[in-house]
Image: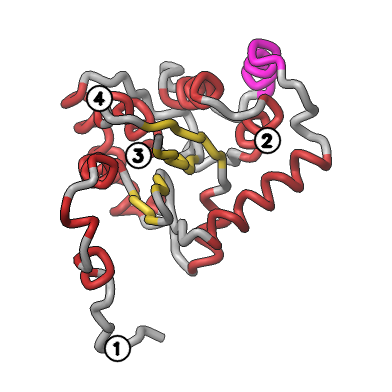
């Protein structure tokens, strides 16, 4: 059975949509999924990128795009009261619980199915923590270290954004990559030959300073 590592940050609406569509996209294929929280902002900082919400025209497009995709697939999606927001409490809570699909679902729904509520509201966070009943202290040093280590592990694996699905050392990025991930899981011929490596070797003509 193949293992897929699903790297996510609940701040990302694309990660939420990919999470909701993953079971259907991989239906009938033998696999197991490990859900791994990672700080999206840390990935952006490492690779020298800005997030979609940090570029105003891209921010507007992003939310139009995810709302369109959500209604196309029948997935409820509500823009939270503030975005971007600090997702660290949610990421640490996931680790403190021992992240699995149930925990990831609770976090995604807390942000994206809340009717537009504030994901940083202390009372809401306290209630979510009570419901999930973490085995460890989300604010403890152990969990904080573990989250930093997760970011380092993701970067070492070549992860540069969320959602990222890693299968056999290959990174599949974004909700649009789900059919490609399914093809790799099926063992499609394209993944068995030189095509994967060859397609990723186009040299840049110039470097932006």
Q: Residues within 10 Å of mark 3 (few under 14, many from 20)?
A: many
Query: Residues under labels 3 and 1: Cα distance?
Result: 30 Å
State the residue position of label 2. Answer: 92
- 173 in relation to 108, above or below: below
Q: Position of residue 81 (x, y in %)?
A: 47, 28
Q: Upstream in the sequence, badge 3 or badge 1?
A: 3
- 154 in relation to 112, above or below: below
Quarter where residue 170 is shown:
bottom left
State the residue position of label 4. Answer: 28
Is 182 on the left or on the right of 79, as rendered? left
Residues at marks 3 and 4 touching, judged by CB atoms closer than 8 Å: no
Considering the numbered disc 1 on the image, is that residue within a helix, a strand or a loop? loop
Query: Residues under labels 2 and 1: Cα distance?
Result: 40 Å
| Secondary structure character of the magenta stretch overall | helix
Q: Position of residue 125 (x, y in %)?
A: 65, 22
Residue furthest toward the bottom? 206
Q: Residues within 10 Å of mark 1 (few under 14, many from 20)?
A: few
State the residue position of label 3. Answer: 14
- 82 in relation to 72, above or below: below
Q: Upstream in the sequence, badge 2 or badge 1?
A: 2
Q: Residues within 10 Å of mark 2 (few under 14, many from 20)?
A: many
> Is 117 in front, or is 91?
91
Task: State the extent of the magenta-drawn residues as a range.
Answer: 122-133
Task: Name the disc covering residue 206, or none.
Answer: 1
Considering the numbered disc 4 on the image, is that residue within a helix, a strand or a loop? loop
Residue furthest toward the right? 141
Q: Residues within 10 Å of mark 4 (few under 14, many from 20)?
A: few
Quarter where residue 21 is shown:
top left
The mark lying in front, picked from 2 and 4, is: 4
Task: Name the disc covering residue 153, or none.
Answer: none
Q: Position of residue 96 (x, y in %)?
A: 71, 29
Does the magenta portion include 130? yes
């Amino acid at each position: 059975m193949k293992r897929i590592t699903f790297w996510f940050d609940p701040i990302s609406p694309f990660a939420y949509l990919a999470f909701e569509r993953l079971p259907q996209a991989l239906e009938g294929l033998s696999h197991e999924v490990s859900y791994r929280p990672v700080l999206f902002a840390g990935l952006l900082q490492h690779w020298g990128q800005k997030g979609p919400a940090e570029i105003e025209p891209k921010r507007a497009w992003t939310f139009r795009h995810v709302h369109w995709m959500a209604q196309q697939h029948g997935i409820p999606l509500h823009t939270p009261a503030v975005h971007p927001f600090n997702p660290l409490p949610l990421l640490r809570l996931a680790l403190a619980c021992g992240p699995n699909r149930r925990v990831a679902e609770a976090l995604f729904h807390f942000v994206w199915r809340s009717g537009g509520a504030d994901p940083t509201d202390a009372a809401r966070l306290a209630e979510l923590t009570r419901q999930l009943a973490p085995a460890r202290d989300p604010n403890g040093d152990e969990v904080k270290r573990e989250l930093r280590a997760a970011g380092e592990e993701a970067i070492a694996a070549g992860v540069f954004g969320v959602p990222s699905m890693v299968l056999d050392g290959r990174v599949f990025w974004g909700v649009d990559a789900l059919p490609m991930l399914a093809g790799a899981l099926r063992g499609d011929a394209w993944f068995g030959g030189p095509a994967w490596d060859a397609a990723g070797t186009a040299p840049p003509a110039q470097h932006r300073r």
